[in-house]
Image (spheres, rainbow, N blue to C red):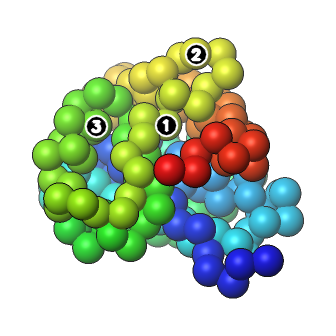
Amino acid sequence: MSTEKKKALFICLGNICRSPIAEGVFQKTVNDMGLGNEWEIDSAAIGGWHVGNPPDWRALDTMKKHGVPYNNCARQIVSEDFNHYDFIFGMDETNMKDLNKRAPRGSKAKLLLFGDFDPQGDRIIRDPYYDSDSAGFEKCYQQSVRCSKGFLERLAAGELNN
Ligand code: 4NP
């Protein structure tokens, strides 16, 4: 078995709503599969507004409700991330545009829309930050569960090798 960890980074605009949920759910998914020590996982923001802050209370509430541990605080993506991580996941098309714009030429990371791994085909993880309730956070959780499994299945099937 390779000793090098696979590395995944989850990105959204602020790193306080969607990408922390995606990160926490992906970490729990690999942990539950007994693969936790094979992965290095983090999340980060496109923008710098919330750097150092914990996730939005609705994101924390949603994760707590589903038994997903989470202790990280927001950080902004840096250019080194594009050569450190194997997979960088965006939550929506705007994230993907921003990631493609920021990626240094020839960098290692595959830039992937997380929703492309949803077997139900719900491709966009909508930003719930300005919502007046928690429903969008629950939906983000459910999408993250499906996308994490879907991605890991496709990876195991060798469909993401170059
Ligand atoms: P996120 O949600 O990208 O899912 O973390 C947002 C959080 C904060 C802001 C926008 C989106 N904001 O503009 O501060």
Q: What separation in Å lies between label 1 and label 2 (alpha carbons)?
A: 11 Å
Q: Nearer the viewer, residue 24 or 156?
A: 156
Q: Is residue 10 above or below residue 136?
A: below
Q: Amino acid at mark 2?
A: Gly
Q: Of all residues shown, which one is farthest toward the bottom?
A: 3
Q: Which residue is mark 2?
A: 121
Q: Which residue is mark 1?
A: 114
Upstream in the sequence, badge 1 or badge 3?
A: 3
The label shown at residue 96 is: 3
Q: Amino acid at mark 1?
A: Phe
Numbered label tally: 3
The label shown at residue 60 is: none
Q: Position of residue 124 (x, y in %)?
A: 43, 23
Q: Position of residue 9 (x, y in %)?
A: 44, 59
Q: Position of residue 41 (x, y in %)?
A: 54, 65
Q: What separation in Å lies between label 2 and label 3 (alpha carbons)?
A: 17 Å
Q: Residues within 10 Å of mark 1 (few under 14, many from 20)?
A: many
Q: Position of residue 45 (x, y in %)?
A: 28, 54
Q: Amino acid at mark 3?
A: Met
